Image: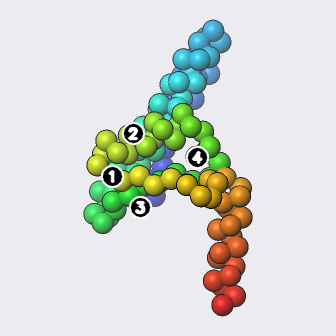
Protein backbone atom coordinates (compact mmCIF):
# COMPACT_ATOMS: atom_id res chain seq x y z
CA UNK A 1 0.00 0.00 0.00
CA UNK A 2 1.31 3.41 -0.99
CA UNK A 3 1.45 5.92 1.84
CA UNK A 4 1.51 9.57 0.92
CA UNK A 5 1.02 13.01 2.35
CA UNK A 6 -1.52 15.32 0.73
CA UNK A 7 -0.19 18.87 1.12
CA UNK A 8 -3.02 20.59 -0.78
CA UNK A 9 -4.86 22.08 2.24
CA UNK A 10 -1.64 23.24 3.80
CA UNK A 11 -0.43 24.81 0.57
CA UNK A 12 -3.74 26.68 0.18
CA UNK A 13 -3.32 27.99 3.74
CA UNK A 14 0.26 29.01 2.99
CA UNK A 15 -0.69 30.87 -0.19
CA UNK A 16 -3.39 32.84 1.64
CA UNK A 17 -1.09 33.71 4.54
CA UNK A 18 -0.31 37.32 5.36
CA UNK A 19 3.38 37.98 4.60
CA UNK A 20 3.81 39.46 8.09
CA UNK A 21 3.32 36.00 9.55
CA UNK A 22 6.32 34.37 7.87
CA UNK A 23 7.86 33.09 11.13
CA UNK A 24 4.53 31.55 12.14
CA UNK A 25 4.22 29.98 8.71
CA UNK A 26 7.69 28.44 8.97
CA UNK A 27 6.94 27.03 12.42
CA UNK A 28 3.61 25.65 11.25
CA UNK A 29 5.20 24.16 8.14
CA UNK A 30 7.78 22.25 10.19
CA UNK A 31 5.21 21.08 12.75
CA UNK A 32 2.70 19.89 10.14
CA UNK A 33 5.35 18.20 8.04
CA UNK A 34 6.73 16.35 11.07
CA UNK A 35 3.23 15.31 12.13
CA UNK A 36 2.45 14.11 8.60
CA UNK A 37 5.63 12.04 8.38
CA UNK A 38 4.98 10.63 11.86
CA UNK A 39 1.50 9.59 10.70
CA UNK A 40 2.98 7.81 7.68
CA UNK A 41 5.50 6.07 9.96
CA UNK A 42 2.66 5.02 12.29
CA UNK A 43 0.73 3.57 9.34
CA UNK A 44 3.81 1.64 8.23
CA UNK A 45 4.28 0.33 11.76
CA UNK A 46 0.63 -0.71 11.97
CA UNK A 47 0.91 -2.54 8.65
CA UNK A 48 4.09 -4.40 9.68
CA UNK A 49 4.05 -5.22 13.38
CA UNK A 50 7.79 -5.90 13.47
CA UNK A 51 8.72 -2.23 12.90
CA UNK A 52 10.47 -0.93 16.00
CA UNK A 53 12.72 1.83 14.67
CA UNK A 54 12.46 4.91 12.50
CA UNK A 55 15.08 7.32 11.27
CA UNK A 56 15.73 10.21 8.98
CA UNK A 57 18.36 10.56 6.30
CA UNK A 58 19.17 12.66 3.28
CA UNK A 59 19.37 16.42 3.01
CA UNK A 60 16.19 16.91 5.03
CA UNK A 61 17.96 15.40 8.06
CA UNK A 62 20.19 18.48 8.10
CA UNK A 63 17.12 20.56 9.01
CA UNK A 64 17.44 20.42 12.80
CA UNK A 65 13.99 21.85 13.47
CA UNK A 66 12.22 19.25 11.35
CA UNK A 67 14.44 16.39 12.48
CA UNK A 68 13.86 17.15 16.17
CA UNK A 69 10.09 17.51 15.76
CA UNK A 70 9.88 14.26 13.79
CA UNK A 71 12.03 12.44 16.33
CA UNK A 72 9.78 13.59 19.18
CA UNK A 73 6.63 12.57 17.29
CA UNK A 74 8.06 9.14 16.47
CA UNK A 75 9.27 8.52 20.01
CA UNK A 76 5.83 9.56 21.31
CA UNK A 77 4.49 6.62 19.28
CA UNK A 78 6.80 4.27 21.17
CA UNK A 79 9.27 3.72 18.35
CA UNK A 80 13.03 3.91 18.66
CA UNK A 81 14.94 6.50 16.65
CA UNK A 82 18.16 6.31 14.68
CA UNK A 83 20.12 9.16 13.17
CA UNK A 84 23.50 9.70 11.62
CA UNK A 85 26.46 9.79 13.95
CA UNK A 86 29.61 9.16 11.90
CA UNK A 87 28.47 9.71 8.32
CA UNK A 88 26.69 12.87 7.19
CA UNK A 89 23.01 12.48 6.27
CA UNK A 90 23.29 14.40 3.02
CA UNK A 91 25.44 13.96 -0.10
CA UNK A 92 28.51 12.57 1.68
CA UNK A 93 26.49 9.78 3.25
CA UNK A 94 24.66 9.15 0.00
CA UNK A 95 27.95 8.75 -1.85
CA UNK A 96 29.22 6.33 0.80
CA UNK A 97 26.02 4.29 0.50
CA UNK A 98 26.34 4.17 -3.27
CA UNK A 99 29.95 3.02 -2.95
CA UNK A 100 28.87 0.29 -0.51
CA UNK A 101 26.17 -0.96 -2.89
CA UNK A 102 28.64 -0.97 -5.79
CA UNK A 103 31.24 -2.85 -3.72
CA UNK A 104 28.63 -5.45 -2.75
CA UNK A 105 27.43 -5.77 -6.35
CA UNK A 106 30.96 -6.27 -7.69
CA UNK A 107 31.74 -9.02 -5.21
In the rendered image, the quadrant that contains the N terminus is bottom left
What residue is disc 3 on? 1
Secondary structure under badge 3?
loop
Residue at image coords 59%, 12%:
21
Residue at image coords 62%, 58%:
87
Q: Earlier in the sequence, mark 3 or mark 1?
A: 3
Estimate the spatial distance between the alpha carbons at disc 3 and disc 2, rounded to whole Å: 25 Å
Secondary structure under badge 1?
loop
Q: Is residue 98 left or right of residue 65?
A: right
Q: Earlier in the sequence, mark 4 or mark 1?
A: 4
Disc 3 or disc 4, which is closer to the eye?
A: 4
Estimate the spatial distance between the alpha carbons at disc 1 and disc 2, rounded to whole Å: 10 Å
Query: What is the x, y in percent for residue 8?
Result: 53, 34
What residue is disc 2 on? 72
On screen, residue 5 above or below 43:
above
Q: Badge 3: few (under 14), some or many (20 or more) residues near its Cα, within 10 Å?
A: few
On screen, residue 94 above or below 30:
below
Residue at image coords 59%, 58%:
86
Residue at image coords 58%, 24%:
26
Estimate the spatial distance between the alpha carbons at disc 4 and disc 2, rounded to whole Å: 14 Å
Query: What is the x, y in percent for residue 62?
Result: 62, 43
What residue is disc 4 on? 61
Q: In the depicted view, which residue is nearer to us: 5 or 71?
A: 71
The disc placed on residue 79 is 1
Q: Earlier in the sequence, mark 3 or mark 4?
A: 3
Q: Earlier in the sequence, mark 4 or mark 2?
A: 4
Secondary structure under badge 4?
helix
In the rendered image, the quadrant that contains the C terminus is bottom right
Residue 36 visible in the current orientation? no
The quadrant in which residue 102 appears is bottom right
Query: What is the x, y in percent for residue 12?
Result: 56, 25
Amino acid sequence: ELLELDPSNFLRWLIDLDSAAVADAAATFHARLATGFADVIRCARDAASDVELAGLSGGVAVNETFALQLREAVEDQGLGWREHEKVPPNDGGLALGQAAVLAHTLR
